[in-house]
Amino acid sequence: EAQVTQNPRYLITVTGKKLTVTCSQNMNHEYMSWYRQDPGLGLRQIYYSMNVEVTDKGDVPEGYKVSRKEKRNFPLILESPSPNQTSLYFCASSLYKNTEAFFGQGTRLTVV
Amino acid sequence: AQSVTQPDIHITVSEGASLELRCNYSYGATPYLFWYVQSPGQGLQLLLKYFSGDTLVQGIKGFEAEFKRSQSSFNLRKPSVHWSDAAEYFCAVGVPGGNTPLVFGKGTRLSVIA
């Protein structure tokens, strides 16, 4: 089954404690991205990757890092989380940058 | 750059009534157009897409959308809403052959009442 898998689904952490949210896709897609979803703001892109070892900033990259060492995986790293990063995060993949995106189930992150 | 507007933040309809969710885009040519649905606690699921051709597009769950170039719109419709359709709906725009990612609208929340 074609899918994008994110883990964990829920995460509560404390300010400053590094965390990683994993994302994996099984569709051999080149393009992967991370979004955060906040009430009233819709989906905002954090980072994206056009292919292995090719990543770039989206609209709201501050406080986040990503890596793309393999085509299928695109982890999101918060080196020093802060409460304003409390949000719902989605990983997505697509064949190309402008084609239909397939989304993971989301990770609800709370930073206290 | 392309942009997309969903004018309605929240819509409430009665079960069995018809539904139309509005989506307007800004782009100089014909874009790629998408509608996604997000049920509570879930990720976004693609309902339908338009790339070219027939301007009336059929999707899953009984939804359809019509591309109107003259109005720069891609409105989502359903003739009879079911309670399970209560969700958030997102319109998205992509640039054919372009190097920009999909742009999403801010979403329309649909409530269904008995």
Image (cartoon, coloured by chain):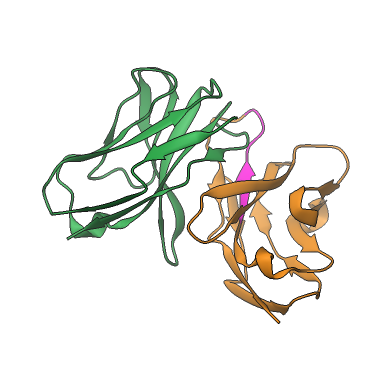
Q: Quadrant of residue A15?
A: bottom left
Q: State the residue at coordinates (74%, 57%).
A: B73
- Please, which residue is most extreme toward the left here? A16
Relative to A112, residue B55 above or below: above
Question: Where residue A81 appears, x then y in whole percent?
Answer: 18, 49
Question: Where residue B47 appears, x then y in whole percent?
Answer: 69, 49
Figure label count: 0
Q: Which residues are magenta?
A: B90-97
Quadrant for the C terminus of chain A, please: bottom left
- Please, which residue is most extreme toward the front here? A1
Position of A22 compared to B4: left or right? left
Position of A67 compared to A44: left or right? left
Q: Main secondary structure of the magenta part?
A: strand
Relative to A52, residue A31 above or below: below
Q: Which chain is orange?
A: B
Question: Where residue B86 appears, x then y in whole percent?
Answer: 63, 67
Q: State the residue at coordinates (50%, 27%).
A: A31
Quadrant for the N terminus of chain A, please: top right
Relative to B23, residue B44 above or below: above
The colour of chain A is green
In-front residue for pair B59/B24: B59
Question: Where residue B12 appears, x then y in whole percent?
Answer: 66, 78
Residue B28 visible in the current orientation: no
Q: State the residue at coordinates (51%, 33%).
A: A93
Q: State the residue at coordinates (56%, 41%).
A: B102
Q: Quadrant of residue B8?
A: bottom right
In-front residue for pair A61/A83: A83
User: Magenta stretch: residue A88 in it?
Assistant: no
Residue B55 visible in the current orientation: yes
